[in-house]
Image (spheres, rainbow, N blue to C red):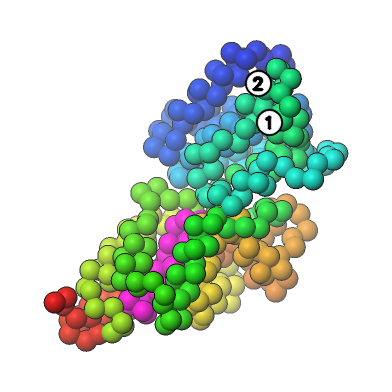
Amino acid sequence: MINTNNMTVEQVEQFADAWQHINDASPAAEADPLVLDCARRLAADPGGDRAHVWVSGLVAMSGYLAWRPGAAAERAALDALRAAAKALDSRACSHDGHPYEAAMDSVEDEVWQGDTGLLTGELAARDGGVDAERVLCPRNVAGWARLVTDVLAPLTVRRIPVGAPEDHQSRIDDLSGIVSDYPYCEPDEVLADEAGRLPSRPTRGVLAGYLVTMNATCWYAASERITERSVPEAMIEGIRAALALLSDGECTHGPGEHPDTGDPEHLAQVGYFLRSPGGRAEIAEHHGWDAEEEGDEGDEEGEPLDAWVCAAFLRGLGQEALGALTDALANTSDPIAEPA
């Protein structure tokens, strides 16, 4: 067992190397012990001087945690991250901003593919690095803890900086034009590309966003506006693959608590907002969400925001889209015609 009270550079690097080998394809037997050890260390002193090391470790392993981790590892990681965010946010800070905020315009759900700077900040601090103090600021560490928590449990975390990634904003513009029936792009190409954007191991937010997008655009793909059969066919294939990835958990929402999907333009926007922490923060801001405690769910209108990632809700959206697209394909001449 490594003594973390006075860790050497070599010991920090030893931890980092072990964490970096954990990814979404890692077997639970290999990953869970590392996650549980890291979460236990963080939970033991969530506001301590070594908290940034353990937060960095859970960020590094969040690719595994965001897919299908062991239940105990997932719960331990979430509990530790929430405790760290709460404890570290209570620490004094004189900074105008923090590095994690500056990265928000490019932070997608795959936060583990980037660099938090927390471990390099640890090493820079030992060498007297100028930026280390800001990187290791407790509130910067708390920011990363919240981002990872939101990736693992979407729409359950407050105080995520608002701002979907720039490429997501661009795609929202394209989709809004299509579903408003005023496209300024090539709808066939955009919808076919969207159909192929489902990762093999999506996060909960990305999977939800994909199915919401497919539902928002299915009516257009099933209309006479699209003449290439390959477009609805690709969407059907993608939707079926997405439905197979949904969890089998029971819905915990009451009557009327699932989101209203009557506005395709809003739905197309939400479909991309769901795919990043900053985008989900835009959903929360739109709903005026102001939960009393970290981890509370809901908005001022009483609609639980995590209903957007509810498997039962998403399954209904996917099946509705499948029905529209398969009905259109059944009529091979109208509205979907064979390409010339």
Q: Residues within 10 Å of mark 2 (few under 14, many from 20)?
A: some
Q: Is 326 placed left or right of 194 in the picture?
A: left
The residue that appears at 80% across and 41% down in the rendered structure is 95
Q: Check residue 324 for magenta coloring.
A: no
The residue that appears at 52% across and 28% down in the rendered structure is 19
Quadrant of the rendered structure where residue 56 is? Answer: top right
The residue that appears at 32% across and 76% down in the rendered structure is 221
Q: Which residues are magenta?
A: 205-222
Residue 304 at x, y percent in the picture: 63, 66
Q: Is residue 322 above or below residue 4?
A: below
Q: Which residue is mark 1?
A: 52
Q: Which residue is mark 2?
A: 123
Q: Is 316 placed left or right of 45 in the picture?
A: left
Query: Which residue in the rendered view is the most extreme toward the bottom?
Result: 334
Judge depth for marks 2 and 1 and give the one in front.
2
| Residue 153 seen in the current view | no
- Earlier residue among tags 2 and 1: 1
Q: Tell me which amino acid carries mark 2.
A: Leu
Q: Tell me which amino acid carries mark 1.
A: His
Residue 180 at x, y percent in the picture: 46, 81
